[in-house]
Structures are given as C-alpha cells and as structure tokens.
Image (cartoon, rainbow, N blue to C red):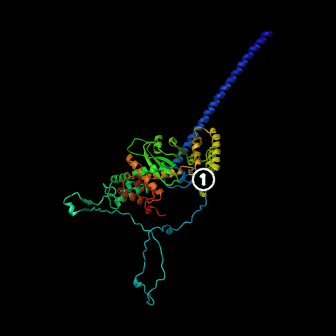
Amino acid sequence: MEVLFHMDNLEFNDKQKAYVKALEAAKIEAENKLKAEQLLVEDQKFQIEYLKQQINYLTHKEYGRRSDQLDKQYPNLFNYDIFNEAEDNASEEEINEPIDVETGEPQIVTFEVKGKKKQNLINRLDKLEVKTIIHDIPDEEKICKECGNPLTKIGETETYKLKYIPAKLIKERHVYLTYKCENCYKDDITNIVKAPYDLAFPKSMVSSSFVANMITDKFLKYVPLYRQEKLFKNVGLDISRQNLSNWFLAGASELEPLVKLMHKDLLSQDIISADETVLQVIKTCKLECRIWGMASNKYAKDQIRLYFYRDNRRHDTGIELFNGFKGYIQSDCYQAYDKVPNAINVACIAHARRKYTDFVKACKGQLKESNSICLEGIKFLDDLYKIEHRLEKENATINKIYEVRNNESKKILEEYKKWLDETYPLLPPKGNLAKALYYSINNYDNLCNYLLDGRLSIDNNLAERCMKNFVIGRKNFLFCFTENGADSSAIAYSIVETAVANNLNVYEYLTYVFDTLPKINKNEEDDLKKLLPYSKDLPLDLKVTK
C-alpha cells in the first residue's frame, strides 16, 4: 500500500506540475498579448499625435505668421526678413510674433531701438533738383493803404512741395548723312562716305532707353509685361505684348556675354552662396524647372549676383554651374553642392533652427515635453547667433571673428552635438521633432564648417535674400511661357541684381550698356569687362547718389 500510495502521490505531483506549467504558459501568453495590445495602442496614439503635428505644421505653413523670432533679448536677429525661405517671404511684410523660450507661448515684447536720429523729410531729399517759385503780391498792392508810401520787404517764408513729372514717350528721328567727293565721284561711284549706324537694336523701332526702362520695370519694380502694355497705351503707344516680349529678348541677348564674364569672375572667387527655387515654364512637361542663384560673399571685392535657369534639380546641374570652382559653397544642405569637386559645403544654421521653430509654432504648446526639448535645441543655436550679433556690433575683423568662433562657438556646437546624440534615441523616429534633430545630426559637420574661415557666414541668408527678389517677381509674372524666356529672365535678373549690389542706377546703367555695345568689339573680352556692373571704368554718374 505504501508503494502504491507513493506512486499515486508521484503521479499527482506530475499532474500538478503540468497544470502549473499550463497556467504559467497561459499567463505568459496573456502578458505577451497584453504587451502587443499596449504597443498597438501606443503606436496608434503616436500615429494620431504625428498626424496632429502634421496638420498643425501644414496649417501654420499655409496660414501662420512666418517669423522665427524666439529670443526677446535679440529681437532684431530673428526677424522674418532674415530667417524665412525665399518662397515663404514673397508675401507682404508681416509682424513678428515672439515666443517665450521657456514656455513656448507667444508674448508681446517691447524693446528700445538705438540708432541714428531721424532726419526730417526735407533734409533726406536734399539731393533732389530744386526749382524755386516766388510767390509775390501784385505791384499795385505794394503801396501802403494808410499813407501811400511803397512797402518794404522784411522777410520771406519757405515751404517745400514734391512735384512728380511723369515719364513720356517721344519719337526720335535719326538722319544719317552721306557725303561724296565731286572730283572722284564721277570716276568711282563707290567713293561715298556715310555716317556710321551705331545705335542699339538696329532692326527694332525701340531705343536703348526704351529697353532699359522695360527691363528695369519688370525686374526691379516687378511690373510684368502685360501691365507695361497698359501703361504704354496710357501714354499714347498702342503696342502688343508680343512686341514687348521680342524687344526684351533682344535686350537679354545683348546682355548675355556680360553674364558669361560675370559667371567666370564669380567662379574665380573662393566663397559663393547658393540657393534655388522653382519656376513654372508652360511649354515644357517637366515639373522640376528651377532658377539657381549664386552670390558673392559680402567680403568679396566684386559683388556679383547670378541666376541660371535649368529644367531640373539634379546634382549634375550643381556640378556644371560650379565647374572650375575651388573654395566654400554656403548652401541649405542640398546634397548637390557636396558633389562639387574641390568645394567645401558650409551649411546654414538658420535652416537647422527653423526646423525647431516650425515645430514650436505647429504644436502651439500642446506637447509640453516635446516643446521643452525643442526649445532646448533652439537655445543652443540662439547662443551661436548671440556671438555673431556681438561680433557684428563690435565691427570685428575677419581674424577676430575666426578666433572668437573657434574659442566660443565651437564649444557650443560640441555641446549641441552631445545633446543631439543623447536626445534623438529617446524620440519617436517618425515624429517631426525627431526629424528636426536628425537634420542637425545628419548635417552636423557641414553646419560646423563656418568655423573654418572668418569671412564665412553662420547662415545662407545672403543667397536667400537674393532669391527672394526673384520670387517677388515670380508672384507678379507667375510663369515663363518658353524656356528661352526663362533663360532671358535669368540673364536680366543677373544684370539688374548685380547692378543694385554695386550701387548703380539700373536704368541709367542699362541705357549706357546698350548704347556702348554697338561701338565696341563684342569679341574682345577686355572691352566687355569695362561694361560689367562692378567695373571701375564705368562713368561715376551711373552711381546712385546716397
């Protein structure tokens, strides 16, 4: 009996163990199922939050104020004119909306602007031509009504009025005289001397001043040709837009050799800022049409601004435009510039900062923890800009800038990199905040490259401001009909913006160029160089009076 009982007891224990194992397996299965459901819920919550962020971000991009101002201590550093993309800035002026760095909430900031004392309007217009008009009383009233003695002048009162003299069209009649020798003409009828025909646009009815005004109105004042057509009709010239287009294309063709020389001169410099933007061209099926912009560094001797039309945004285009260049390219982290041989890509801190500011505005303080992380990242970059602000205020030399950046800015960037590496793994990988951090992680080396030379800028805002001028014009003429028109527009913008950068009166300069080109050898590079906007051989009266 003992043996049987013992055996029964062993059999019972095995069943019990099997039962316990079954319970444990069921428990593990339930726990795994619960974890899977929790992960599913967490993933769904993340997807919901992610979609909310996307909606807020896109809503802000479409309707929100385009300001990157987040620091109340340096309000003028982060205004819309500096930090926004050219495409975002093409609208009318907007008021900055500062955000408190700690809370992320919008706030009203007041600050004192120190600068030169404002001059009154009359003193600021002292360069204008003055026409004096004397207002006097009739001679018969210059007799005293009481005693009849003549009145004596004892003083005068001055007041000023601005008079506008509208432009007008006149028809020039050009007469070319022909001469002969009375003795030789009988024997040699070919011995005839004619006045040279050296006017611009010989096959057209328009003069240099007409085409110069048309280009200035379109590319400096942003008046498209269909509006110019109406304006000319208002002053008595009933001309079609097709005629205006043909005259503009003829003018751009004359300017093209100058742009090629400017491109050659720009590539000989060692720092270039670059940016690109879209342009719709009707008669092409390609959706990637772009205007590529290039600009000299602010320390360059010759200030050059260039625009090129290309029907793509491929890396090969960047290599083509920078063919032969050696030095630094300041850009917005577009990888095409990394492919340029012998070039160092200097990325834009403003773009890295904008990734955070867009997130702060999009979430509107709803995600406190994420908002806090985002504002922490912004603070690193703001500290870099405070150093730049101080250097600018001190009017520091290039060597001083280089020294301060490597002593102070470099440490901040190293701390920023450490913070990025510690924070990024903790964030959901698909969220906008993670993307904002990854932008800096992925481009960190290029973001630090501005430390290599004191002439380099902390951001790419110079190129963006140049591109902004094109975008403002694009919002008026909307598109180019043909690729030839797009090329011609790029040529005209290059000449106009370079003339502005060199403090030239655009209309007077273009008129001078068009008048001079027929009188020189266009195949001689030295003759053409004298007409470049930054040439020292240009007449001094082409400069804008300051």
User: In the visual, does 199 lie left or right of 544?
Assistant: left
**Residue 320 in the image, given as x and y percentages of width and height:** 45, 43
**Residue 421 in the image, given as x and y percentages of width and height:** 63, 40
Write down the residue under mark 1. 399
Amino acid, disc 1: Asn
Which residue is more in the foreground, 236 or 314?
A: 314
Q: Residue at x 44, y 71 (%)?
A: 130
Which residue is more in the foreground, 314 or 428?
A: 314
User: In the visual, does 426 lie left or right of 460?
Assistant: right
User: In the visual, does 69 lie left or right of 23?
Assistant: left
User: In the visual, does 244 lie left or right of 55?
Assistant: left
Task: Give the quarter of the image for residue 23.
Answer: top right
- Of the 4 image quadrants, the one containing the N terminus is top right
Q: Is residue 476 visible?
A: no
Q: Is residue 215 visible?
A: yes
- Near mark 1 (Cα within 10 A), the count class, few <14, some 14-19 or many ≥20, is few
**Residue 26 in the image, given as x and y percentages of width and height:** 67, 24
